[in-house]
Image: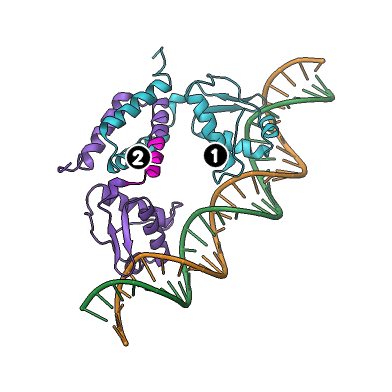
Chain colours: A purple, B cyan, C orange, D green
Amino acid sequence: MFDLDLRSRKPIYEQLVDKFKELIINDVMQTDEKLPSVRILAQQLTVNPNTIQKAYRELETQGYIYSVKGKGSFVDGTAKKVSSHEVNKIRSDLEKRLAEAFFIGITKDEIYKIIELTYEQIGGGDKDD
Amino acid sequence: MFDLDLRSRKPIYEQLVDKFKELIINDVMQTDEKLPSVRILAQQLTVNPNTIQKAYRELETQGYIYSVKGKGSFVDGTAKKVSSHEVNKIRSDLEKRLAEAFFIGITKDEIYKIIELTYEQIGGGDKDD
DNA sequence: TAACCGTATTACTAATCATAGTACAGTTAA
DNA sequence: TTAACTGTACTATGATTAGTAATACGGTTA
């Protein structure tokens, strides 16, 4: 399911968080779809279940999944109601990145292109919006 | 000169890097302007000179300043020739942030607003471009 | 009950951070 | 030349944090 780099300086749990976020954002995983159990995934990836759980917990606090004891972890369909704290973090982070991008010479045009591309790629907003 | 939070979980040297980047990006510090010497700044902030130097080294590898042995460290005017590696990093990072921002419900309009604001704030590109 | 779920706790290891001390080399002005 | 600045390199140390692992606990479901 995943190709994670155990030798990377990027922590395993972080790689997992990014992977899942990507899958969720790009609609590869649908709302309420079940994620593999911590143990199953741990076994498949030959890492410790706690590492998986750490990733899942992070995904949960960021609003991408929800977990139910005894049942499993699932893609959060209400993800768009992310806490305002998270929203602000992402917004200010975006500002910082943009300032950097501008500074190193990336043009507004380029930024616009990136935006449109990204927007298309993630489905351009749900059809039922 | 700086108000850094010694109790923050954010490393001191990282706070310094961000501070200087901000000053440089927002044109508060001009091209070839001299940064405080590592020892002077260390004394002012009551931190170890090595901590300052770590920040300066990071700023240098990121292309924001240049250092000359015996003379000092200065704002890099050629900052826009950042290594393509750095550019790519910032670009892909920006894409990731954008995808996240879209996902959590920030609209394209909002993004555009943020872009314009950021663009204005950093001086809207040099006049001699 | 058995087999599966997430979760909490504890512990060990490795990496990171900041500091300290020392030394080396280039610059500049007295 | 010397003295007083600059940046840089290296090693070592202590403290903290991050990452992972092992184990146990509690809920769910068939």
Q: Could you say which is closer to the camera, residue A60 or residue B40?
A: A60
Dot 1: within a 10 Å radius of its alpha carbon, few (fewer than 14), some, or many (20 or more) residues? some
Q: Chain of mark 2?
A: B
Of the residues shown, which amino acid type is indicated by label 2?
Arg
Question: Which residue is at the front of the view, A98 or B108?
Answer: B108
| Residue plotted at (60% across, 44% down) | B7
Residue C6: image location, x then y, percent:
35, 65
Residue D19, placed above or below residue B105: below
Element type where label 2 sits in the image: helix
Q: Residues within 10 Å of mark 2 (few under 14, many from 20)?
A: some
* Image quadrant assignment for residue B96: top left
Residue B14 disc label = 1
Q: Quadrant of the N terminus of chain A?
A: bottom left
Q: Look at mark 2 in the image and give the residue it sits on.
A: B97
Find numbered disc 1 in the image and state the secondary structure of the residue it sits on.
helix
Q: Is residue B61 left or right of residue A108?
A: right
